[in-house]
Amino acid sequence: MTDLAEARRLDDADPLAHFRSRFTWPDGVIYLDGNSLGALPVATPGRVEKVIREEWGIGLIRSWNDADWISMPQRVGSKIAPLIGAEPDEVIAADSVSVNLFKLIAAALAMQPGRTVVLSEPGNFPTDLYMIQGLEGQGLADQKTAAADDLEAALGDDVALLLLTHVHYKSGRMHEMARLTKAAHDVGALVLWDLSHSVGAVEVDLNGCDADFAVGCGYKYLNGGPGAPAFAYVAKRHHDALQQPLSGWMGHAAPFAFSDDYTPAPGVDRLLAGTPHILGLAALEVGVDIAAEIGTAALAEKSRRMSEFFRAVVTEKLPDLELVSPTDPAVRGSQLSFRHEHAYPICQALIARGIIGDFREPDILRFGFAPSYLSFEDVFKAATALAELIERGEWQRPEFSERSKVT
Ligand SMILES: *Cc1c(COP(=O)(O)O)cnc(C)c1O
């Protein structure tokens, strides 16, 4: 059954329902874009204000020690670790996903003398490919791509690194991390997983899969706020050999010795380059704490149930709408993507009704089901509104076709 009463029954039985009140909601909005920018936790403004007014305003430079600002990248990283199947000292929060990709692709290449190929897939998130291409421009890498089903066949003994996004940003399709990691290792390649659309929404077991490296995003399902710091993971067995090219002073073994010569800090600390972004880390920590409190298993379970409920309502009301995501929730992330020739104006018409999903070029309507704050009632109402406005042709109003800068 897919009616409103059923949605409310699912909400009543939802063990995570009370987490909704930990987030701030504008009136009249149903938010299905938490996979692009997570919602604002109620506690974040107070926490950031405290850092600004007390720790910065009054503590001034003393707060590096007194408020332990200096350990924030490690502390926030250690809280992300259990969400991705890592040990606390294998994860650090810093920089952006793009910058962390650069550091770790370069570090992997340095560990693989005689190999230069970085294998990825066409249509991967652009920054992942662009970062390989940047290193190609430096003469350090050779990009090779193979479609998802051909990756194993493309793994040869020239491949230094396999770089994949675990959950595809457009389709939501999820790679089999354990199988692909093993296939890469079998030919002597290392593996770097981009977890931007995974962390906080699906189960990830990096150490269980014997992964080498990973990066992930702080502002999507971790609700760290726009431009929140990202994170990076390095398996412990690589800590001593890890050499990253952005050898800034904060990644030095003794930054305050002010020595002329670079000596890397132990473990993942050497992934730091410059001074940590304390305001960003403070906001990110609030979001991470909520995700850690709920735990990955419960987040993933609710994600699957919500996306399945949305799919059931849409299938019933719009049987012709083409689903691009896998139908099996076990092999997709916390999103559903549909193909429609008029995806852009449909998305704008939905936003005009207060239902925020997003559009991805050229014809994809994408809906994310952030498990910590969405209700089944939201999901039902959004799917019903989608069906209604497509049936009525409501999206045909000319203003819905005007493209904005950020889609
Ligand atoms: C969102 C996202 C990023 C973001 O990278 P930034 O450098 O933090 O902007 C990277 N990779 C994937 C797969 C993403 O979905």
Image: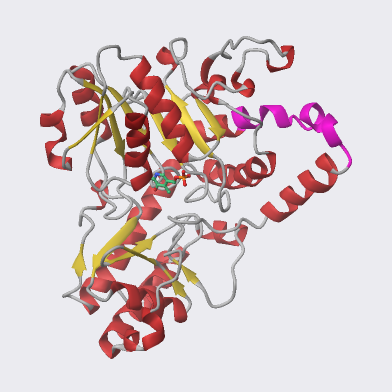
Q: Does residue 84 appear in this view?
A: no
Q: Residue at x 72, y 49 (%)?
A: 48
Horizontal side, residue 288 vs residue 176: left or right:
right
| Residue nearer the viewer, 26 or 53 | 53
Q: Residue at x 44, y 39 (%)?
A: 98
Number of numbered discs overlaid on the protein picture: 0
Magenta-span inclusion, residue 69: yes
Tell me which residue sits at (21%, 54%) in the image: 326
**Residue 177 screen position, x and y as percent:** 27, 33
Q: Is residue 1 above or below residue 215?
A: below
Which secondary structure dominates the residues rendered in magenta?
helix
Left or right of residue 311, residue 183 in this image? left
Q: State the residue at coordinates (58%, 27%).
A: 273
Q: In the depicted view, which residue is nearer to us: 407 or 296?
A: 407
The magenta region covers 58-75
Which scheme is used to colour this image of the protein? secondary structure
Vertical position of residue 382 compared to residue 200: above or below? below
Residue 370 image offset from top left, x and y in percent? 44, 56
Nearer to us in this view, 270 or 29: 270
Q: x, y (%) of residue 340? A: 23, 72
Which quadrant of the structure image shows residue 360? bottom left
- Residue 46 image position (x, y, % from top left): 74, 53
Q: Is residue 404 visible?
A: yes
Relative to 369, is 87 on the left or the right? right
**Residue 208, quarter of picture:** top left
Name the image quarter holding the C terminus. Answer: bottom left
User: Image quadrant for the N terminus?
Assistant: bottom left
**268 magenta-colored:** no
